[in-house]
Image (cartoon, grey):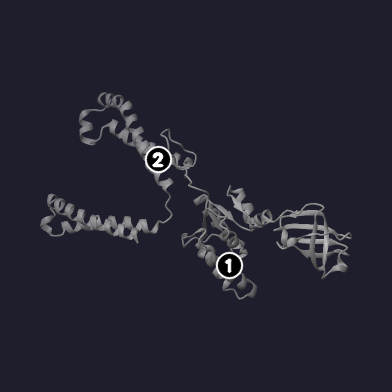
Amino acid sequence: MLLWALRGLFLLILAGVAARISSDFSGMMGFAATGYGALIFFGGIMGLGVLAVLFDVLYRRKEIGSISAVYFGVLIGILLGHLLGLAVGPTLRMIELSYIPSDFRAAHSSMSLADAFSLVATCILCYICVSVILQTKDDFRFIIPYVEFSRQLKGVQPLILDTSVIIDGRIADIADTGLLDQNVLIPKFVLDELQLIADSSDKLRRNRGRRGLDVVDRLQKCRRISLNFHEGPPDDRREVDARLIELAKEVNGRLATNDLNLAKSAKIQSVATVSMHEVSNAAKPPVMHGEVLSIRLVREGEEPGQGIGYLDDGTMVVAEMGRNFVGQEVNLVVTSILQTNAGRMVFGRIDTRNPEPRAASQRR
């Protein structure tokens, strides 16, 4: 709203300036007698102002680093061009006076050779300076203290959520604990993908999509985090993964995803990622070799004689020779621990000595 008020104020002030200029210049140039001179000047100036506002509205992906690079590049180019003109100018004037006849100069040229050289040199140097700074703005530093083009982050990097993390739902539980101290960013195209999944004809996909929308609602109501929705260009037809990586680069954020392929692609492109699986595994309480657990076996294992149970945090426990104890709570001595990308598996054997175990619910 404030931005639109600024645009309206700009057009109002420009209208006053255009009216003053059109009134003065139309009379000076002899257009006043026609009755259309002031209108032509006013319309031309207002047309330029409207074009400027339209450009501002349509081109939304503005970067202060790029704009600053253009400004400083043009400034440095003009300065170098002026200095080069001062250095070479006297030599060019001597050449012009010595080899170009005065009547030819008066008849064919209103610009001296030195001025022409300075103008061309300035244009070339401006282009070179802007191009070099745009390509190196992330590493460019001025000798002037505190002036640089690279983004100065205040606090930690924003956390960008992809569809898989939102549907997973654990991010909402983490947010409720107050552990997240950075801004959480959900792109608009991720919300669109969740809506598309929620509208699917497949029941499983539809439930997943609705779960994801419920998680977004939880995050929006959570007061312990700062949640923002990123509005990207509506005409971007790239895949969601490519747009997520591009957004992470643009805002210098970290990408939260459970998609292994997306995480690998982001790593190749130097984008930091966070996996909810890894966070969950890191938060699980440690299980030590030789520790005694109280576990309820709920089903048979894949191998002969095995029984399967689960800790309170979802960790699978494989009990050797525990098939006959399925449906019962047994004491299990931990023999080995297997860590995989999907999680952690604990292997153990039935404790025949029946010691007093530490219950799984007490280990949290």
Q: Nearer the viewer, residue 16 or 299?
A: 299
Badge 2 local density, few (<14 within 10 Å), some, or many (20+)? some
Q: Nearer the viewer, residue 206 or 99?
A: 206
Q: Is residue 197 left or right of residue 281?
A: left
CA gap, disc 1 to disc 2? 48 Å
Q: Which quadrant is home to the C terminus?
A: bottom right
Instruction: Please give the name of the residue rendered at 41% of the width and 56% of the height, measured from the top-left corner.
Output: 60
Observer able to see residue 44: no
Q: Reading the chain from its start, which is encountered first: label 1 or label 2?
A: 2
Amino acid carrying label 1: it is Gly
Image quarter of residue 149: top left
Mark 1 or mark 2: which is in front? 1
Badge 1 local density, few (<14 within 10 Å), some, or many (20+)? many
Residue 303 position, x and y percent, is: 86, 63
Q: Is residue 223 left or right of residue 273?
A: left
**Total tally of numbered discs in the picture:** 2
* Label of residue 212 in the image: 1
Residue 3 position, x and y percent, is: 34, 58
Q: Is residue 215 left or right of residue 96?
A: right
Residue 290 position, x and y percent, is: 82, 53
Instruction: Please give the name of the residue rendered at 36% of the width and 40% of the height, measured from the top-left corner.
Output: 74
Instruction: Please give the name of the residue rendered at 38% of the width and 36% of the height, measured from the top-left corner.
Output: 125
Determine whether label 1 and label 2 are within 8 Å by CB.
Answer: no
* Label of residue 127 in the image: 2
